[in-house]
Each structure stands twice: as structure tokens, then as C-alpha cells.
Image (spheres, rainbow, N blue to C red):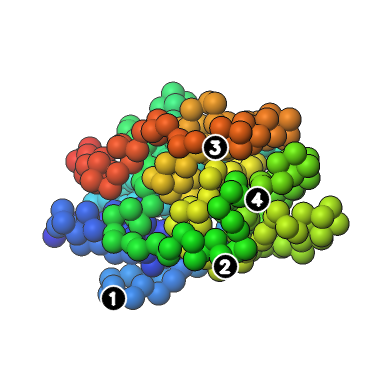
Amino acid sequence: MKEILFIKDNLDEDIKLGQIYLEILEKLDYKVHVICNEIINNYNNYTKLEFTRKLFTLKNLKTYKILKKIIKQNDYKIIQCNSFVSGVLTRLACRKQNKKIIYSIDSFKFYKKQFLIKKIFYYLTEKYLSKYTNTIVVGNKEDYVIAKSKFYAKHVKTIKILNIKQNIEYKAENKDNIKEKLGLVDNDYIFLNIGDLTKTENHIIQLEIMIEIIKYYPQAKLIISGIGEQKEYLENIIEKYGLSKNVRILENTIDTIDLLQICDCYLTTSKNKGNVDNLLNAMIEKKPILATNIKEFRDLLKYKNLFEENDIKTLKHKMIKNIEKCKETQIYYNLEKYKLENVKKCIMKIYSNVK
């Protein structure tokens, strides 16, 4: 039986892209050896190794040495790594071993508005290590173009998958019950944001705009669902500027799908590497979406939905326009290529190209 080494920092309990890869590999009669940070329930052939997010740490050095030893001792037909840190350590460990490597990353760590030194470091690291990579799999078109035109990998593919909840039976709570829990009424226009309460998510501009909007549109409400270090700071702003009746912060107490059922517009102001899963779920629910003009969102949305990172004026205009229109969203989202069955076909092709 052909053997493959599958390396991922974390394997989520629900069926995300990593689990789909494993399912397909087993169907293709590969014996899969998994390396990840955590213990995997109901899976015997795995090794627990600790990867830390910061690349230059003693823990990662120790992991690199163990990883190199494991790879040298086993005859893997394919090695697949699925994040920046595991991708760097794995490919460095394989430089002199002539292995077939698939490197999968949702989004490269370099981006347009990043601090220049960091941007150069991440770019040069990815370019150098692409010499030892058979296939690079990315999650957006912008990264695909860079990898295809600038890097050395033989194959480059793009894969993005819809949240798996679309593929299982899911019964949302009654809309009226959810609204009642949150003290909302029928004529409220509800903006929803789901994301960690961090500076990167840029919630402050949402609050700045709401201060202005509620003067003319008191029916406008903003629900922010998430946890993080900025919770107290944001709550103080809400209290200081009298937003308590119009803005609520929830600590993930209501399910994402239930919140999407009651919202009128999904809003994200993320500065970089936004949460694509939540945005895709909003697309499934056919909700109007307003999102920052970053590469993860450009792939999914038309430009009329996008605004620049700190362009408060444009975002305010778009939010008001949505309140005033307040009608069903046109079905302009192209979801077909992100559906599970189509993603599986793409993954199958990836393995067939590794020879």
C-alpha cells in the first residue's frame, strides 16, 4: 500500500478541508500517517508534534529535527503540509530527500499593505521553498497568480470550500425566538459581524459609523459575535457614545447560522486574512454582504460589495444604502465551484498529478 504523510498544525473536529483530504486519500488506498498538534480521536496512525505559530522558536526547532528523522526513516510516496509553519519545517526537512510534496495554505502571509520587511521575508521564504514543492494549493486567485508566475512549483491549484454545515441537516431556531432573546423587533435593520474581538478585525470603525447612522436611522442595529482582548475596550466605546440600544456584543452564545437567519446584512471590516467561512455562510443564506477589499474576499464578492480598509465614508454610504433599499438580495453569488462535490474532484486531480 502507498503511504502518505499528512502534516497539519491542527485537525478540527468538524469536517473541514483537512478531514476531506484524509477521506479522499483513504478512498485512493493510501496508508495515511498524520502528524499534528493534537490527539486525534478514532485514528491510530498519527504522531503528535507541536508546531507553534511563531516560526523561530525552540519548540519548532525540536519539531523540525523529529520531523526530519521521521521522513528519513519512512518511504512516503507523498508528503502533504497544510500551513505556513508546517510547510516551512517540512520542506526544509525534505531538501535533500527528493520527496513529492503538496503544500496547502489558505492564504500566503505576505499581502499588499503589510510592513515591508515582513512582506519581503514571507515572500522570499515561500519562493525559495517552492523549489522543493511539487504542488501548491492556495485559497484565492491573487495567491494563485503569484505562485503560478513567480514560484517554482510544478503545479498550482486553487481550492476553497463552503462551510460543511450546508451539507448536513441543520434546523435553525425560530427567527422570532432569536430576535426576542436579543430584544429585537420586526422593523429593525440588523447588521451582523462575526469575528474575534481584535485590532485586526477593526470593529472600531463599525462603532464610529453606527454613532452617525442611528441619528437618522434609529432602526439600525449591529450585532457583533465573538471573543477577544478588545471586548472591554469596545464595550466602553458602546457605553460612552450611547450605543447600548443599537449595538450588542455576544460571546458566541448564539450559533452562526441562527444569527445569519435574522440579519439583514453581513458586515466584515477585517484588515487581513478575514474569516472566509462566515462570509461563505452569509452567501449561502443570500444575505447582502459588505466586506473589506482584501484578497480572501475579492475572490468571492463583486467589487460593489467591497470597501477599503479605513474608508469610513464609503462603508457608511453602503450601510445606509442597504438600510434604505431593504429588499431581497439579488442572487449573484457564484457558489457552485465551492460545493463539496466539486472540491473533491479538484483534490482528486491534485493527487493524480503527483507522479
- Give the foreground label among 4 and 1: 4
Q: Is residue 307 above or below residue 41?
A: above
Say left or right for 60 vs 73.
Answer: right
Instruction: Kindly state the secondary structure of the residue where label 2 is placed.
Output: helix
Q: Residues within 10 Å of mark 1 (few under 14, many from 20)?
A: few
Q: Position of residue 284 (x, y in %)?
A: 39, 45
Counting residues from the start of the chain, the first of labels 4 and 3 encountered is: 4
Q: Amino acid at mark 2?
A: Lys
| Residue holding disc 3 | 326
- Give the foreground label among 3 and 1: 3
- Give the foreground label among 4 and 3: 3
Counting residues from the start of the chain, the first of labels 4 and 1 encountered is: 1
Instruction: Kindly state the secondary structure of the residue where label 1 is placed.
Output: loop
The answer to whether marks 3 and 2 mark residues whose Cβ atoms lie closer than 8 Å is: no
Q: Amino acid at mark 3?
A: Cys
| Residue holding disc 1 | 42
